[in-house]
Image (cartoon, rainbow, N blue to C red):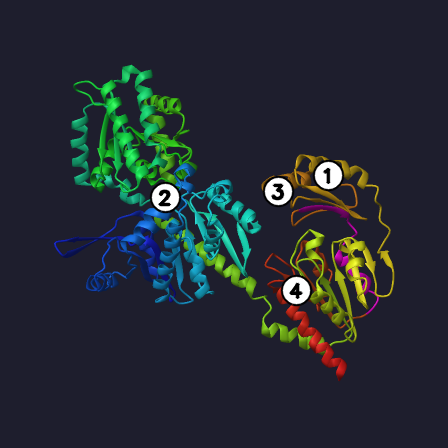
């Protein structure tokens, strides 16, 4: 393929160490590196990231660049201060605790934030030295959340994916971040935003809705002439590597050595990086409670606890290490005997052979994080079980819980439940263990790390193509010239123009949508053009339109989505006689929902009723709106009514009322050669559908539409209409 694939992450998949002036390079065997490997075969590829070493020496930097260039890698060098503030500071003292629901550990420090921005810009600058518009760019994780937008500013047509490897918090937590708007804007620079689970997708979409006012349709967000997709992609592991580990001679040897050392004890395995989000202390207390409740298992069970050192310079981690040492010592002191140590505690990382040997021989895997993006340890433990023996105790808060439903799911805060789960796991018959293991292994084998990466990139490309297909209909210079030419060459003409969201920014509040001098002057000029009938459409009441536009000569007004019509020089009239008796049945229902939804209210129009929830809590309002829609649809099934859900409103009106029906009042009584319709809302779709095939229809915004063209916003609508006015004035003078 001709396209190039660029990966950007905080760290490069390589470890560089310096000893006695010599640099040593060792490739990482991590999951991400494995997942990306397949793309190096399909694309010309590049990986950009920090090389893991701090140096101020120009010669050393150049040497590193040269050596990494051979591996298709580009280093981004950071100073010690930048590493402290960007990585240890904002990334791991602000974002990490907040996104893992440890708000009490979150530090809001302006210097951290300023450095985080600076480093994200540094990564963008490194990328822009190599990137082109047709590259596929994949940005990884919470260290670089500003990067998608920074790239988009310089390469607006590029294909950008972002994947968050940690949880995305609920809106209530995310909103506490002082820089939340910047983070949100950074993420929205991507075409595809990936998360491990749908819960995280849901939280992200909720924040988009509440902070940016952005709706979504099946995870697709319309933003700045682009369609952004948020979706879940549960990260897998290198299944073959772990499943086949027990066949390796070195691993077999290690398994035999460890089994001989631990005698006939049942083995419970706990492996984690030192972190307060992992629930390690509660896990220990759960094991302690198990020994207290079931003393018959003393000297028969051993907990192997492997804790990998992490962020030792951060105070909260040093404090956790001290607590961990204390609790392990207490439990071993209370329950241990001369020949038996209840907890075998290893504070270090383990090489692959030792790690997989423990996975293979352990009877129980104990994985109990308070919150985890995915937790690959749980998947690795299951993958290693070639003999089908083993039970996984897993926190329901881990992302992996969605895929490993056959495990024993527990609440990591419940010490009693952890203790009972350990006891239950020891009682599970081998046949049941085998069935559970096999079922989980099927999932892990099917959706491994390579499938995960391919799935993400395929979705990214598909969404980009979908977004571009929508842009094809967008109005540009050529389309504008075509419309103006059609206007010039065809007469008589008629123009149906929506008001809210089309000529002015949408706002349900009348005081914010009142037309200014610019809009009034625009409409006056349009309405007086030669051989041109102008109809202003609105869902607002006729009294409001009369107050705002009644003084504009030759302007036709259509109120309440077509219920009322005022032709130029005439009085207001209804298109047809409509029954309003149905209101007596519907109003009590709306009043009940208004009472149950603080901030919502009812607007009574002549021929419709509207329940507004723009002032209510958005989440509650959306739930109530769906409930109300279901109830009203059932109630009005045998009535000539239409129930519609709009922008924070639910509207009930006579089925015969629509902008399309109102348009027929003009189109049936006179033959027009140039027919133009423009609008932004769901009610305008009815107008577009009722237009003849030769009509020029335009949708404002990027929602799904039957219109022939799209236009970005009210600003571009005004520019287009000014161009039409200029053409019309030229016609008058000639």
The first of marks 3 and 4 along the sequence is 3
| Of marks 4 and 2, the one in the foreground | 2
Quarter holding the N terminus is bottom left
Q: Position of residue 609 (x, y in %)?
A: 76, 45
Is residue 530 found left or right of 112 in the rendered image? Answer: right
Residue sitting nearer the eye, 361 or 570: 570
For label 4, the residue is 698
For label 2, the residue is 93
Alpha carbon of mark 4 to alpha carbon of mark 2: how far? 49 Å
Quarter holding the C terminus is bottom right
For label 1, the residue is 590
Placement of 431 over or under 575, stated as above or below: above
Q: In which quarter of the view is residue 562 placed?
A: bottom right
Secondary structure of the residue carrying numbered label 2: helix
Is residue 204 found left or right of 546 in the rendered image? Answer: left
Secondary structure of the residue carrying numbered label 4: strand
């Amino acid at each position: 393929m001709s396209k190039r694939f660029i990966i950007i992450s905080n760290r490069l998949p390589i470890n560089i160490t310096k000893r006695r002036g010599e640099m040593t390079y060792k490739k990482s065997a991590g999951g991400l590196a494995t997942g990306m490997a397949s793309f190096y075969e399909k694309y010309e590829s590049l990986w950009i990231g920090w090389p893991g070493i701090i140096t101020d020496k120009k010669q050393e930097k150049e040497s590193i660049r040269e050596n990494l260039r051979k591996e298709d890698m580009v280093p981004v060098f950071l100073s010690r201060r930048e590493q402290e503030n960007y990585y240890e500071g904002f990334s791991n003292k602000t974002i990490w605790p907040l996104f893992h629901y440890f708000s009490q550990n979150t530090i809001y420090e302006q210097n951290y934030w300023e450095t985080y921005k600076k480093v994200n810009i540094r990564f963008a600058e490194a990328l822009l030295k190599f990137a082109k518009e047709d590259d596929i760019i994949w940005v990884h994780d919470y260290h670089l959340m500003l990067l998608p937008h920074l790239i988009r500013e310089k390469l607006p047509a590029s294909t950008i994916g972002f994947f968050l490897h940690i949880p995305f918090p609920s809106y209530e937590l995310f909103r506490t971040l002082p820089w939340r708007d910047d983070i949100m804007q950074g993420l929205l620079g991507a075409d595809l935003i990936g998360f491990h689970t749908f819960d995280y997708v849901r939280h992200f979409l909720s924040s988009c809705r509440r902070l940016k006012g952005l709706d979504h349709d099946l995870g697709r967000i319309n933003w700045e002439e682009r369609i952004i997709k948020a979706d879940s992609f549960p990260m897998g592991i290198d299944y073959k590597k772990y499943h086949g580990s027990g066949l390796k001679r070195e691993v077999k040897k290690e398994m035999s050595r460890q089994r001989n050392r631990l005698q006939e004890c049942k083995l419970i395995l706990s492996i984690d990086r030192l972190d307060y989000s992992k629930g390690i202390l509660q896990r220990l207390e759960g094991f302690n409670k198990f020994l207290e409740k079931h003393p018959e298992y003393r000297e028969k069970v051993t907990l192997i606890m492997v804790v990998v050192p992490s962020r030792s310079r951060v105070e909260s981690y040093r404090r956790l290490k001290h607590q961990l040492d204390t609790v392990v010592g207490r439990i071993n002191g209370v329950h241990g005997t001369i020949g038996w140590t209840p907890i075998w505690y290893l504070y270090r990382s383990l090489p692959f052979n030792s790690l997989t040997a423990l996975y293979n021989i352990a009877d129980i895997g104990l994985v109990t994080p308070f919150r985890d993006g995915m937790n690959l340890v749980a998947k690795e433990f299951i993958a290693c079980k070639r003999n089908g023996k083993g039970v996984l105790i897993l926190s329901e808060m881990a992302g992996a819980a969605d895929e490993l439903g056959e495990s024993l799911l527990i609440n990591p805060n419940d010490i009693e439940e952890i203790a009972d789960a350990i006891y239950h796991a020891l009682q599970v018959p081998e046949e049941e263990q085998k069935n559970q293991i096999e079922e989980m292994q099927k999932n892990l084998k099917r959706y491994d790390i390579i499938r995960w990466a391919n799935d993400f990139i395929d979705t990214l490309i598909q969404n980009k193509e979908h977004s571009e297909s929508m842009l094809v209909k967008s109005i540009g210079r050529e389309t504008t010239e075509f419309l103006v030419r059609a206007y010039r060459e065809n007469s008589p003409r008629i123009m149906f123009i929506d008001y809210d969201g089309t000529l002015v920014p949408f706002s349900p509040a009348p005081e914010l949508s009142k037309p200014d001098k610019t809009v009034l002057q625009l409409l006056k000029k349009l309405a007086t053009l030669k051989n041109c009938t102008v109809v202003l459409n609105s869902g607002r009441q006729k009294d409001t339109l009369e107050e705002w536009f009644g003084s504009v000569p030759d302007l036709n007004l259509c109120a309440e989505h077509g219920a009322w019509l005022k032709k130029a020089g005439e009085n207001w009239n209804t298109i047809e006689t409509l029954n309003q008796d149905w209101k007596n049945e519907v109003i009590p229902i709306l009043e009940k929902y208004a009472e149950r939804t603080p901030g919502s209210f009812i607007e009574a129009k002549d021929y419709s009723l509207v329940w507004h929830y723009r002032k209510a809590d958005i989440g509650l309002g959306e739930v109530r709106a769906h409930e109300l829609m279901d109830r009203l649809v059932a109630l009005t099934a045998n009535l000539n009514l239409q129930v519609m859900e709009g922008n924070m409103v639910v509207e009930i009106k006579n089925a015969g009322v629509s902008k399309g029906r109102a348009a027929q009042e003009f189109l049936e009584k006179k033959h027009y050669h140039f027919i133009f319709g423009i609008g932004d809302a769901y009610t305008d779709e009815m107008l577009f559908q009722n237009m003849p095939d030769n009509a020029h229809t335009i949708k404002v915004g990027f929602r799904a539409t039957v219109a022939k063209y799209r236009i970005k916003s009210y600003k571009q609508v005004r520019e287009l209409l000014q161009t039409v006015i200029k053409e019309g004035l030229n016609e008058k003078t000639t």
